[in-house]
């Protein structure tokens, strides 16, 4: 924002004085924050740094020691430079001792060999500074207006990232806490090069603070989150120069991004955080009420009595009923909106979700059931079935599943024998593989600039069997409850089971909750920032080390050790290493993580963190 000493010397009022650089050429690119005229030797006490001092020298000391002290004091407070007009005190040039002191301090010392009105110099420089400040304000206003519009329009993260890249002309990347790319815009640069080995590269960027520029990597980084909980980082690569001219600290001269670029990345992060909080789909009024009531039961945002009252207004009686939460979702996540395929798996996300919600509502009606039905997140549709008594639960669920299969053929199990396991009771059938999962946010492919919701990494559910149609539906039911106050628990359980069932190899008409192992639990929690924080706390130092030394791959050594039950000999064989080499690597891992790898508790914690890392990376 400020002109440099070099730029000031090129101004016409200064050139009129025939300037000549006597010392301090290395400091010519220091920014000039202000111009100050001084004729007293102790002026340094009145300065703050970044000033260009103009003087005729009439008040300067006559002895060499005094001149050295004068120059030392100016350099000590960080002035940008000293300009001395010849003719009044010094006729042929400034004293050599003065030039030598300035050279040692790296401070520009300039002679003006012709008489120069200092007022013209100050006017010219201050005009530059004020113009730059006005430009900065206009840029900040444009940034504010652009991102306010994006917030009002409910722009998705991909659009926010694109606008940030367009305004800055720099590559922008949005990542979650596990360093997975959620959205990006390369700003005319090569996207493959930008994202190549992204996780390793990102882990090397460890700035301290919410918004910090890392000069070693050239990335300006800010945290993304709201209500005291961060869920990602927004990074903007600024190599310096170009349209967005660099800023220098007025005292130290350190290069940093211009203020308006910092404002831009922080405003973009705020827009992303706000969008995550208020994002909603456009729905009909009745569907909105259904969704409002289901959401209230899930997050307890409204009193239960109010939910019951509003449900009665829709003709639904939820009191004194046996309530069962049901969640229906596609086995595969929503595809990229740019897809143009023909099958259900290629339908644009909002349309696919809307069709699924209508099919679930129709199935409830065809099965002669009553309840609330609505989308509960970007991928799943929920239903709260109100039954007369617990004995009707299995029959009602079977009728609902049959009706939905008639409406949506892809929900039919591929194994006819599985139809005998309709998931009655609490899902106690042997071998049934249900799990848990949040499923609250749509997963996009890593780096997709049109990411629908931050907080997720690379998306796409795993097919249950090789060659299977990934467009199939999953129907999951929670445990039945007898009170509306417990209905949220049944819905949450159904949603978790539906999410975990995406990775289940069985095809069941209805998934229940037989058991959720540790891997299923971690799969369920993989988008939880607290789990990602746990992984970073346990393994972050080792992941960072591997990022700096990719050939060593110590994470693989730790995995082999833990998977072999801490049997070092078996682990060395599994890792194809000699035992001495394997033991040395274990010792190095222990030093990096500062843990005792012979401790059961420490290894248990590390093993859980490894499983969580796998769940995050394969989500």
Image (spheres, grey):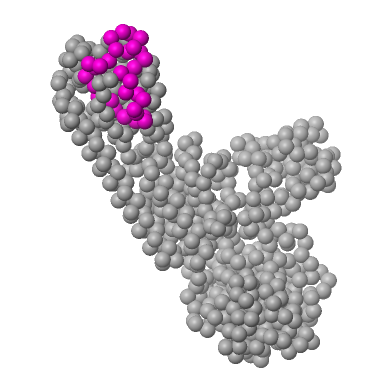
The residue sitting at 71% across, 50% down in the picture is: 609
Q: Is residue 137 above or below residue 495?
A: above
Q: Quadrant of residue 582?
A: top right
Q: Which x, y percent locates residue 298?
A: 64, 72
- Name the quadrant of the C terminus: bottom right
The answer to if 69 sits in the magenta stretch is yes
From the viewer's side, name the closer residue of 449 and 135: 135
Q: Which x, y percent locates residue 363?
A: 63, 86
Q: Quadrant of residue 398?
A: bottom right
The answer to if 595 sits in the magenta stretch is no
The residue sitting at 33% across, 8% down in the picture is: 64
Q: Quadrant of residue 424?
A: bottom right
Q: Is residue 590 above or below residue 498?
A: above
Q: Which x, y percent locates residue 396?
A: 72, 86
Horizontal side of 192 relative to 372 (left or right) equals left
Horizontal side of 115 relative to 540 (left or right) equals left
Q: Which x, y percent locates residue 26?
A: 35, 22
From the viewer's side, name the closer residue of 510 and 345: 510
The residue sitting at 17% across, 18% down in the picture is: 113
From the viewer's side, name the closer residue of 213 and 318: 318
Q: Is residue 613 above or below residue 489?
A: above
Using the rendered image of the protein, determine whether residue 273 is visible from the camera's viewpoint.
yes
User: Which stretch is magenta?
Assistant: 41-70
Horizontal side of 597 relative to 133 (left or right) equals right
């Amino acid at each position: 924002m400020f002109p440099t000493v070099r730029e000031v010397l090129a101004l016409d009022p200064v050139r009129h004085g025939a300037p000549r650089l006597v010392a301090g050429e290395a400091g010519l690119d220091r920014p000039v924050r202000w111009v100050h005229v001084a004729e007293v030797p102790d002026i340094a006490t009145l300065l703050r740094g970044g000033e260009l001092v103009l003087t005729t020298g009439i008040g300067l000391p006559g002895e060499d020691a005094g001149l050295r002290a004068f120059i030392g004091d100016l350099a000590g407070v960080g002035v940008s430079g000293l300009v001395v007009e010849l003719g009044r005190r010094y006729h042929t040039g400034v004293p050599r001792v003065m030039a030598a002191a300035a050279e040692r301090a790296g401070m520009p010392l300039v002679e003006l060999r012709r008489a120069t009105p200092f007022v013209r110099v100050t006017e010219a420089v201050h005009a530059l500074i004020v113009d730059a400040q006005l430009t900065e304000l206009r840029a900040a206003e444009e940034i504010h207006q652009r991102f306010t519009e994006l917030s009002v329009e409910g722009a998705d993260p991909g659009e926010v990232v694109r606008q940030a890249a367009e305004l800055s002309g720099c590559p922008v990347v949005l990542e979650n806490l596990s360093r997975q790319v959620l959205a990006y815009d390369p700003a005319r640069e090569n996207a493959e090069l930008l994202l190549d080995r992204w996780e390793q590269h990102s882990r090397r960027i460890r700035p301290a603070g919410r918004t910090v520029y890392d000069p070693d990597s050239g990335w300006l980084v800010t945290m993304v989150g709201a209500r005291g909980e961060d869920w990602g980082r927004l990074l903007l690569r600024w190599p310096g120069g170009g349209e967005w001219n660099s800023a220098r600290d007025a005292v130290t001269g350190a290069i940093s991004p211009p203020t308006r670029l910092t404002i831009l990345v922080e405003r973009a992060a705020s827009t992303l955080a706000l969008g995550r909080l208020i994002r909603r789909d456009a729905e009909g009024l009745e569907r909105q009420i259904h969704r409002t009531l289901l959401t209230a039961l899930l997050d307890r945002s409204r009193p239960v009595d109010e939910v019951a009252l509003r449900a009665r207004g829709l003709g639904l009686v939820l009191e004194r009923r046996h309530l069962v939460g049901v969640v229906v979702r596609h086995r595969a996540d929503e595809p990229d909106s740019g897809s143009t395929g023909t099958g259900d798996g290629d339908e644009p996300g909002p349309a696919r979700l809307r069709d699924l919600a209508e099919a679930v509502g129709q199935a409830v009606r065809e099965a002669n059931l009553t309840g609330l039905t609505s989308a509960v997140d970007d991928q799943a549709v929920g239903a709260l079935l109100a039954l007369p008594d617990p004995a009707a639960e299995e029959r009602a669920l079977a009728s609902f599943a049959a009706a939905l299969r008639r409406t949506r053929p892809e929900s039919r199990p591929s194994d006819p024998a599985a139809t005998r396991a309709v998931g009655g009771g609490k899902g106690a059938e042997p071998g049934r593989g249900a799990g848990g999962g949040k499923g609250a946010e749509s997963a996009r492919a890593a780096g997709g600039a049109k990411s629908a919701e931050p907080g997720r990494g690379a998306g796409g559910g795993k097919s249950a069997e090789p060659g299977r149609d990934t467009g199939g539906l999953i129907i999951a039911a929670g445990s039945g409850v007898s009170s509306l106050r417990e209905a949220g628990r049944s819905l949450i359980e159904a949603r978790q089971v539906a999410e975990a069932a995406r990775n289940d190899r069985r095809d069941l008409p209805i998934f229940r909750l037989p058991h959720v192992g540790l891997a299923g639990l971690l799969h369920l929690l993989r988008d939880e920032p607290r789990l990602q924080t746990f992984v970073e706390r346990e393994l972050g130092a080792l992941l960072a080390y591997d990022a700096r030394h990719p050939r060593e791959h110590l994470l693989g050594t730790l995995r082999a050790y833990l998977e072999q039950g801490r049997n070092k000999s078996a682990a060395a064989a599994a890792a194809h290493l000699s035992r001495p080499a394997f033991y040395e690597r274990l010792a190095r891992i222990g030093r990096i993580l500062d843990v005792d790898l012979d401790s059961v508790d420490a290894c248990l914690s590390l093993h859980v963190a490894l499983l969580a890392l796998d769940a995050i990376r394969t989500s």
